[in-house]
Image (tube, rainbow, N blue to C red):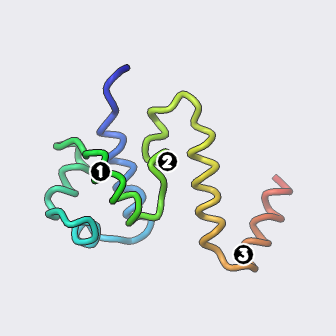
Amino acid sequence: MENLDFAFIGQRIRELRNEKMLTQEYIANAVDVNVSHISNIETNKVKVSLTLLVRICNVLGTTIDYVLEHEYHCQDSAMEQELVNVFKGLGKEKQELLLRIAKVL
C-alpha cells in the first residue's frame, strides 16, 4: 500500500472548515489541540493521527471516507454520504426542492 496523501487530507479539512465558516481556533478548541497543530495538519507539516482525524471529522460534521476519498479506488460511497449529509442539513422545503432538481438532472 502506498502512503496516504496527507497534503490532500489537510486540504480537504481546510476546505470543509472554510465551507462551514469555522476558524482553526474553533476546531483546535473542539478537539483539544493547539491552533498551530490544526494549521500544520492543513498545510501538511504534520501527519494527522487517526484518532484526531475522527475527532476533526465529528466537529466538521463529515465522514472519514469523505476526507479520505482520494485514497479509495471506489469514491462513490464518500460522495453519496456527503450528499446525504447536505440533504439532512436542509429544511423540509429545501429538501423537496433539491429532490425535484435532482430528478430533473
Indicate left or right for 41 with 78 as reference.
Answer: left
Q: What number of labels is visible?
A: 3
Earlier sequence position, callout 2 versus callout 1: 1
Which one is in front in this view, the residue at disc 2 or the one at disc 1?
A: 1
Front-lying residue, 73 or 32? 32
- Looking at the rendered structure, the secondary structure element under dot 1 is helix
Q: Which residue is mark 2?
A: 66
Distance from Cα at disc 2 to Cα at disc 1: 16 Å
Earlier sequence position, callout 3 versus callout 1: 1
Residue kind at label 1, given as amino acid type: Thr
Q: Which residue is mark 3?
A: 94
Which one is in front in this view, the residue at disc 3 or the one at disc 2?
A: 2
Q: Which mark is residue 19?
A: none
User: Which residue is found at the position 64% from the left and 59% from the top?
Assistant: 84
Front-lying residue, 1 or 27? 1
* Residue 105 in the image, given as x and y percentages of width and height: 81, 52
Indicate left or right for 69 with 89 as reference.
Answer: left
94, above or below 4, in the image: below
Residue kind at label 3, given as amino acid type: Lys
Earlier sequence position, callout 3 versus callout 2: 2
Distance from Cα at disc 3 to Cα at disc 2: 23 Å
Q: Which residue is mark 1?
A: 51
64, above or below 29, in the image: above
- Looking at the rendered structure, the secondary structure element under dot 3 is helix
* Residue 85 in the image, given as x and y percentages of width and height: 59, 62
